[in-house]
C-alpha cells in the first residue's frame, strides 16, 4: 500500500516540478539567470548580490547545479547540428533536474536517517506528501540545494557516529567538502549543523586523522570556491594567483557581514524574533507541527532543525524558505498519533493542507510570469520583438528566457496606475511625432484599475490583447481593507490570470 502511495506522490511531485509557478524571484535571479548569461550569452539581470562592491553570492555552487546541465545541453545541441538551445528547454531541464535531485538525494537521505523499516515507510511518505517537497524542492532555490547539503551532512555525521571502531576517513573527507560547498551556497548551513558538530567532537578526539581529513577537504573546497568567485568578480585581472593573495573574494564572509547589519536587513524587511515560530513553521509544516511532541526521541535530525530555528530567529530578516531543510528533518522524526480516530483526523487535515498549498504554490502563484516571458521570447517576427515590454504588478520576470530577442524588459513593480500609464504613454509617443510605436504591457487581470483606462473615451492609448493565461494568482494584490474579504477574493481569484497587451497610440 505504501509503495502505491509513494508512486502516486511521486507523480504529483513531477507534475508540479514542470508546472511553471514562480514562488520567489530568488529562484531565478540567484542561479539560472546568472549562469544562462555565462553559458549562452543570453541577456540577464545581475541583482545587487552580484554587483555590490562586496558581492554576497558565490558562483561556485551554481556551476555544478546549473552550469553543468546547461553545458551538457549546449554540447548535445552542437553535436546534433541543431540551432541554439531554446530557453524554455533549459528552464524545464533545470526543473526536471531539481526533481531528480529531490527524488534521489532527499528520499535516499531519509532512508539513511530512519533505521526502523516501519518508521522509515512513514517518514518517506510524509516527506513525499509535503507540498514543500513538491514545490520549493523542485524549484531552483539555493534553499533547495541547502536542504540536500544539510540532509547529507547529517547522514555523514550519523555514519561517523555509528562507526566507532574505524576512523572513516572517506566519510570525514566527504563531510568536509559538503559543508564547504553548503556554506558557499548559503551561510545559514552552520545553523543546522551545530548539533552534528558537537556530537562529532568525541569521535574526532578518538580519531584525529578523521578530523584532519575533514579539515583538508573543507579547506581545499573553500580555496577552489574562492578562486572561482575571485575570477568571476575580477575578470580583467592579469594574475589570479596574485589576486588570491592580495584581494580574494570571499562571498560567505561578505554575506555574513551584510546580514549582521540591521540597516542592511531593514531594506528587505525586519521581523520579530518569534516570526519563524508563529508563521514560518506553521506555513511549512501545517498539521505536522502539532506532532512535534510525538517525536520518537531527540535525535540528530530534530536537534538540527531546532538549532536552526532558534539561531535563525536571532536574525531580524526571516522568510519561511530559510527553514526549508528543517521540513524533512522534522517530518522524518515525528510519530503519528496512536489513537485511530486522531490519526484519521490528522491525515485528513494533512491532505487538505498540502493539496491546497500545493495547488496554490505549485500551479497558480505568479504562474503566468514564466509562460508569458517564454511566449515573448518566441515572437521573433512580431512587432514586440524589438521594443520595450513593461511588467506591472508581477514578480520580476526572468530576462534570460527571452533568449536572443531585442526586447527590453522594464519592471515597474507595483507603482501606482497613473505613474505606470505615464511611463507607457511616454514610451509609445503620440500621433504627432514622426514614429509612433507600440510597446508591450504585462499585467494581472485582477488589476481592475486598468479597466477604466481601456474603456475610457478619448484615451490616447489603444490596448490590444495578445496573450493570456488563467493560471496566475497575484497574492501581493490582496487588499482586504479596501475591498473587504469577499471583494478581494472575487477580484484576485475570480479574475485570476495574466495578460500581455500591445499598447499603441490612438490614431485620430
Image (tube, rainbow, N blue to C red):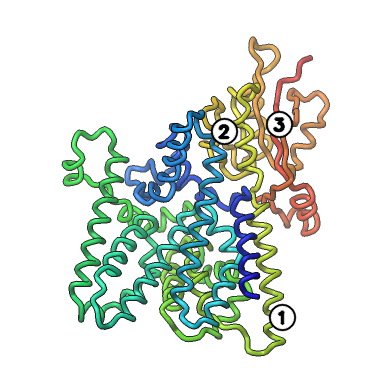
Total labels: the figure holds 3
Residue 447 visible from this viewpoint: no
Looking at marks 3 and 1 on the same chain, the residue that comes earlier in the sequence is marked by 1
Is 200 located above or below residue 260 in the figure? below
- Residue 345 visible in the snapshot: yes
Camera-side residue of 67 and 482: 67
Q: Give the residue number, with chain letter if any, for mark 2.
A: 410
Q: Nearer the viewer, residue 333 or 326?
A: 333
Of mark 2 and mark 3, the one earlier in the sequence is 2
In the picture of the structure, the residue carrying the numbered disc 3 is 501
Secondary structure at numbered mark 3: strand
Q: Is residue 250 above or below residue 84?
A: below
Measuring 41% from the left and 44% from the top, which residue is drawn there?
A: 67
The label number, if any, that marks residue 345 in the structure image = 1
Asked which quadrant contains residue 215, the reply is bottom left
Locate residue 228: give its quadrant.
top left
Amino acid at each position: 500500500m505504501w509503495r502505491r502511495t509513494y508512486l502516486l506522490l511521486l507523480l504529483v511531485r513531477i507534475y508540479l516540478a514542470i508546472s511553471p509557478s514562480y514562488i520567489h524571484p530568488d529562484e531565478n535571479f540567484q542561479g539560472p539567470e546568472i549562469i544562462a548569461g555565462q553559458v549562452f550569452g543570453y541577456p540577464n539581470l545581475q541583482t545587487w548580490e552580484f554587483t555590490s562592491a562586496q558581492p554576497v553570492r558565490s558562483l561556485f555552487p551554481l556551476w555544478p547545479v546549473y552550469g553543468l546541465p546547461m553545458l551538457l545541453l549546449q554540447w548535445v545541441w552542437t553535436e546534433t547540428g541543431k540551432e541554439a538551445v531554446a530557453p524554455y528547454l533549459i528552464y524545464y531541464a533545470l526543473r526536471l533536474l531539481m526533481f531528480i535531485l529531490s527524488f534521489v538525494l532527499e528520499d535516499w537521505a531519509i532512508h539513511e536517517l530512519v533505521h526502523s523499516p516501519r518508521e522509515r515507510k512513514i517518514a518517506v511518505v510524509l516527506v513525499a506528501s509535503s507540498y514543500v517537497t513538491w514545490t520549493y524542492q523542485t524549484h531552483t532555490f539555493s534553499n533547495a540545494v541547502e536542504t540536500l547539503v544539510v540532509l547529507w551532512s547529517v547522514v555523514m555525521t550519523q555514519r561517523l557516529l555509528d562507526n566507532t571502531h574505524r576512523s572513516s576517513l572517506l566519510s570525514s573527507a566527504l563531510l568536509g567538502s559538503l559543508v564547504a560547498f553548503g556554506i558557499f551556497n548559503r551561510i545559514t548551513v552552520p545553523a543546522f549543523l551545530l548539533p552534528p558538530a558537537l556530537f562529532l567532537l568525541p569521535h574526532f578526539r578518538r580519531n584525529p586523522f578523521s578530523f584532519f581529513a575533514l579539515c583538508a577537504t573543507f579547506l581545499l573546497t573553500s580555496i577552489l570556491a574562492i578562486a572561482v568567485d575571485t575570477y568571476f568578480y575580477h575578470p580583467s585581472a592579469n594574475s589570479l594567483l596574485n589576486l588570491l593573495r592580495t584581494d580574494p573574494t570571499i562571498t560567505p564572509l561578505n554575506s555574513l557581514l551584510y546580514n549582521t547589519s540591521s540597516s542592511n536587513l531593514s531594506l528587505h524587511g525586519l521581523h520579530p524574533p518569534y516570526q519563524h515560530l508563529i508563521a514560518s513553521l506553521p506555513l511549512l509544516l501545517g498539521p505536522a507541527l502539532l506532532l512535534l511532541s510525538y517525536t520518537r526521541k531527540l535525535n540528530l535530525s530534530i536537534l538540527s532543525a531546532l538549532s536552526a530555528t532558534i539561531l535563525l530567529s536571532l536574525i531580524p530578516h526571516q522568510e519561511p524558505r530559510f527553514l526549508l531543510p528543517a521540513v524533512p528533518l522534522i517530518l522524518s522524526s515525528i510519530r503519528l498519533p496512536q489513537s485511530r480516530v486522531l490519526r484519521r483526523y490528522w491525515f485528513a487535515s494533512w491532505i487538505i493542507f498540502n493539496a491546497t498549498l500545493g495547488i496554490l504554490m505549485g500551479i497558480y502563484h505568479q504562474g503566468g510570469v514564466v509562460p508569458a516571458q517564454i511566449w515573448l521570447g518566441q515572437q521573433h517576427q512580431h512587432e514586440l520583438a524589438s521594443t520595450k515590454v513593461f511588467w506591472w504588478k508581477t514578480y520580476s520576470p526572468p530576462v534570460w528566457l527571452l533568449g536572443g530577442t531585442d526586447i527590453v524588459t522594464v519592471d515597474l513593480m507595483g507603482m501606482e496606475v497613473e505613474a505606470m500609464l505615464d511611463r507607457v504613454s511616454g514610451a509609445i509617443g503620440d500621433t504627432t511625432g514622426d514614429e509612433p510605436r507600440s510597446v508591450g504591457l504585462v499585467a494581472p487581470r485582477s488589476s481592475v484599475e486598468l479597466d477604466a483606462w481601456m474603456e475610457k473615451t478619448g484615451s490616447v492609448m489603444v490596448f490590444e490583447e495578445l496573450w493570456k493565461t488563467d493560471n496566475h494568482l497575484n497574492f501581493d494584490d490582496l487588499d482586504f481593507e479596501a475591498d473587504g474579504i469577499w471583494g478581494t477574493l472575487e477580484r484576485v481569484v475570480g479574475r485570476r490570470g495574466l495578460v500581455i497587451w500591445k499598447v499603441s497610440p490612438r490614431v485620430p
